[in-house]
Amino acid sequence: MDAALASGLSVARVATMFDHAVSENTLRRHKPHLTAAMVELKKEREQAGPRSAMDRLEELYKRTTRILNAAEREGRAGVSLSAVRELRGLVETIAKITGELDERPQVVVNLAESREWAQMQDVILGALARHPDARVAVADALFDADLIVAGEIEA
């Protein structure tokens, strides 16, 4: 309600937004007590324009860290644990957005054990057997690219 009042909406509109849970008279009496800081914050947010999800997450991270630090100083274990849970979730979300955490399934294909690769290797080596100079050139190129160890392809 405070944010709605600070945004400049009429008392009647704010009361309607909240299904008249608070009377218009109560809202009128409350409106002068809105802090100047809240009104200023609203103006700043409007001037700053839309923020990215990452910006909002970073801000939540900072706020939650402050809550955690205050709770630890005050010995409030329950609040500390809640803040830790929130921070864990924020860190995970930030890591997903930045690519630090990739939960996509990882597929490893071992070509050396592939039947198709063995067949291809036989075909290539068979073709190169008829061209000794080409066979040596291919072996040298593979060696230079660190793809084979010297002596793996027999000349």
Image (cartoon, helix red, strand yellow):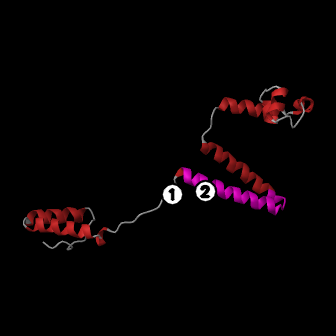
Residue type pointed to by label 2: Glu
In primary-sequence order, the first of circles 1 and 2 is: 2
**Residue located at (26% from left, 61% from top):** 145
Q: Residues within 10 Å of mark 1 (few under 14, many from 20)?
A: few
Residue that numbered label 1 is attached to:
102
Is residue 5 in view from this perspective? no
Cα–Cα gap, marks 1 and 2:
10 Å
Residue that numbered label 2 is attached to:
92
Q: Residues within 10 Å of mark 2 (few under 14, many from 20)?
A: some
Is residue 62 in view from this perspective? yes
Q: Residue furthest front?
A: 19
| 149 relative position to 33: left or right | left
The secondary structure making up most of the magenta span is helix
| Quarter location, residue 82 | bottom right
Span colored in magenta = 71-97
Residue 106 at x, y percent in the picture: 44, 62
Q: Does the magenta segment cover residue 96?
A: yes
Q: Nearer the viewer, residue 37 or 93?
A: 93
